[in-house]
Image (cartoon, rainbow, N blue to C red):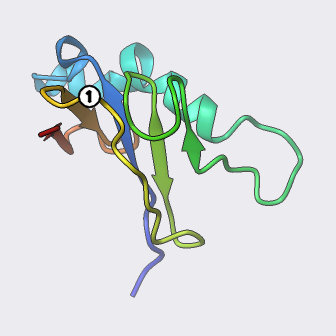
Amino acid sequence: MGPVEGHTLSIVPRSELPRTLREVQFCFDVVCRPFHEAHDPGNDQQPPFVYRVNKGGPGLDVAGDSLLVDADHPVIRARVTAPAGTTLHYLCAIHSWMQGSIVVE
């Protein structure tokens, strides 16, 4: 068995979700780079990763919020704090074809 790949659950506006193969291929340049930079700020700490990025309030509520899951942190919990009636769209900033939405009831 090979190494476990990391994933993110990164909240983005629906309009920024890659829809074509070309958009998926160039997601890093257009949409995904800020998530990579937020989770791996390039400092000399060990481990260098930031596992929760909150752009809004605590929990998942606005575009820019992101969770990182990897072999060192395979389970992470987060509360969805967006108001009822909100739909949050997300992608994996590492594998941008992995996308979905969370409908807050």
Foreground pick, 27 / 7: 7
Residue that label 1 marks: 83
**Whole-percent x and y of residue 5?**
43, 64
Where the C terminus falls, by quadrant?
Answer: top left
Question: Going 25% across and 15% down the picture, which residue do you hit?
Answer: 16
Residue 26 pos. (x, y %): 32, 21
Camera-side residue of 41 and 102 = 102
Q: Relative to 43, does residue 87 appear above or below in the rendering?
A: above
Q: Quadrant of residue 97?
A: top left
Crowding near the residue tagged with mark 1, few <14, some 14–19, many ≥20 C-alpha atoms within 10 Å: few
Residue drawn where x is 10% and y is 22% of the image: 20
What is the x, y in percent for residue 74? 47, 71
User: What is the residue that sits farthest to the bottom in this orientation?
Assistant: 1
Query: Against 83, is 1 above or below?
Result: below
Residue shown at 48% from the left, 75% from the top: 3
Residue 12 in the figure: left or right of residue 4: left
> Which quarter of the figure has residue 21?
top left
Is 92 situated left or right of 43 in this image?
left
The image shows residue 46, relative to residue 94, as above or below, that is below
Amino acid type, label 1: Pro
**Number of residue marks:** 1
> Which quadrant: the N terminus?
bottom left
Question: Which residue, as the protein is rendered here, is positioned at the far right?
Answer: 44
Comparing 55 with 45, the one in front is: 55
Query: What residue appears at the point 19 percent right and 23 percent down from the top-left corner?
Result: 18
Mark 1 residue element: loop
**Relative to 56, does residue 80 appear above or below in the rendering?**
below
